[in-house]
Image (cartoon, rainbow, N blue to C red):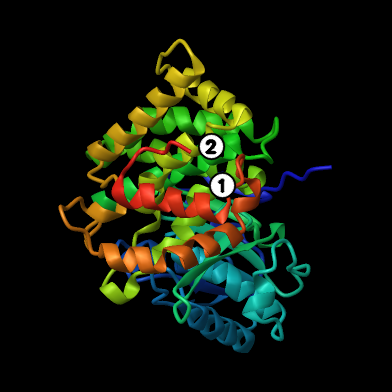
Amino acid sequence: MARFTLPRDLYHGKGSLEALKDFKGKKAIVCVGGGSMKRFGFLDKAVGYLKEAGMEVKLFEGIEPDPSVETVMKGAAVMQEFEPDWIIAMGGGSPIDAAKAMWIKYEYPDITFEQMCEVFGIPALRQKAQFCAISSTSGTATEVTAFSIITDYEKGIKYPIADFEITPDVAIVDPELAETMPQKLVAHTGMDAITHAIEAYVSTANCDYTDPLALHAIKMIQRDLVGSYNGDMEKRDSMHNAQCLAGMAFSNALLGIVHSMAHKTGAAFADHGAHIIHGAANAMYLPKVIAFNSKDETAKARYGEIADFMNLGGETLDEKVDLLIKYLRNMNDDLNIPHCIKNYGADSYPTENGFVPEEVFLERLPEIAANALLDACTGSNPRQPSQEEMEKLLKCCYYDTEVDF
């Protein structure tokens, strides 16, 4: 028996933020990030609609990118005091992910962060509040998923919380919010979305319900991402739908080791002054992981189907996989994303010497590889790497060398 879970209601299209007017409840807390929602007037609109619905509204602002365990605990304490019956999370993946974790702690004050991270081990939510997610970026799709990524800065590790309980009750996918994204964010979130769709399609948990969502998302991203990056707002609007479809696919089909590696390298070099931004990490690692996974015949056939669906050409399966890898690398070039960690600058742009020194990378490599193997996303990858293979794969991602094992 398998399970397929999505939000009960999904409002989409321009102006869908207005759906908040019809929410039933007494108190709503709105969780937001660094200020773009306020700056562009969307926060005021949302608060206005909730007040129109007769609710008392409280704000929890300033959720940082890559939200911390501390922020989660702080937000949950505010919720325990305010006692909302609606949690409204608004913005990019970070405020929505943080609010999901706050929701668990609000409903179960005694739960520890370690217990939250037990895969599919969260007790039943919705005893105190329902959850609405309003996405402003076109990538993470956390508005429709059973996942949340929280960073433990002491350990320098990002932890995925995975449980169908944290799938939002309502998702609002209003493209007007995504039109405000800066260009770099368009690139990174877009590559996150195509990684979601490709990993979902080759995952060991793929099924008839997730495959069409993944393939259609890939087709839309192929058509619209580069145009969206270059300022075409019709394509920007379409990308907001594409990333959501990819999210529906991976929330149910799960992911693979591209994400495991991205989670475990993201904050691993923070002491050198920067993070490897999640979407950029996925973009760099995806071609290498495709090369690694395609040594498995079932995965190779699935990658071939993706290449066919994208009309990339090729006669043999090997040719099709190579063309898919080449296409994704060209896409990185079009989006100004580097091909490897060695050339990843602190600003995320390609550079001769990246911010992660070679000796630091090699020193931390065994631990990063071990952590990646333990990541929640590794279990559904089509080819299970050993510690040695994971280290070799991460080296290929550092130096941009061929995967021949």
Question: Which quadrant is home to the N terminus?
Answer: top right
Q: Name the residue type under label 2.
A: Asn
**Total numbered labels placed on residues in the image:** 2
Residue 136 figure quarter? bottom left
- Label annotation for residue 389: none
Query: Which of 281 and 4 lies nearest the eye of the viewer?
Result: 281
Look at 70% across and 34% down and name the residue there.
207
The answer to whether marks 2 and 1 mark residues whose Cβ atoms lie closer than 8 Å is: yes
Give the mark nearer the N terminus: 2 vs 1.
1
| Outermost residue toward the top in this view | 315
Camera sees residue 163 = yes
**Crowdedness near tag 1: few (<14), some (14–19) or many (≥20) residues, C-alpha within 10 Å:** many
| Outermost residue toward the right in this view | 1
Residue 238 % position (x, y): 41, 36
Look at 34% across and 28% down and name the residue there.
327
Residue 394 % position (x, y): 42, 52
Query: Which of 311 and 98 lies nearest the eye of the viewer?
Result: 311
Mark 2 lies on a secondary structure that is helix
Query: Which of 297 and 26 lies nearest the eye of the viewer?
Result: 297
Q: Which residue is label 2 attached to?
A: 293
Q: Which residue is label 1 attached to?
A: 256
Mark 1 lies on a secondary structure that is loop
Residue 314 % position (x, y): 42, 13
Please name which of the two marks, 2 or 1, marks the residue nearer to the observer. 2
> 67 left or right of 41?
right
> 123 left or right of 40?
right
Look at 52% across and 22% down and name the residue there.
304
Q: Name the residue type under label 1.
A: Gly
Does 351 appear above or below 300?
below
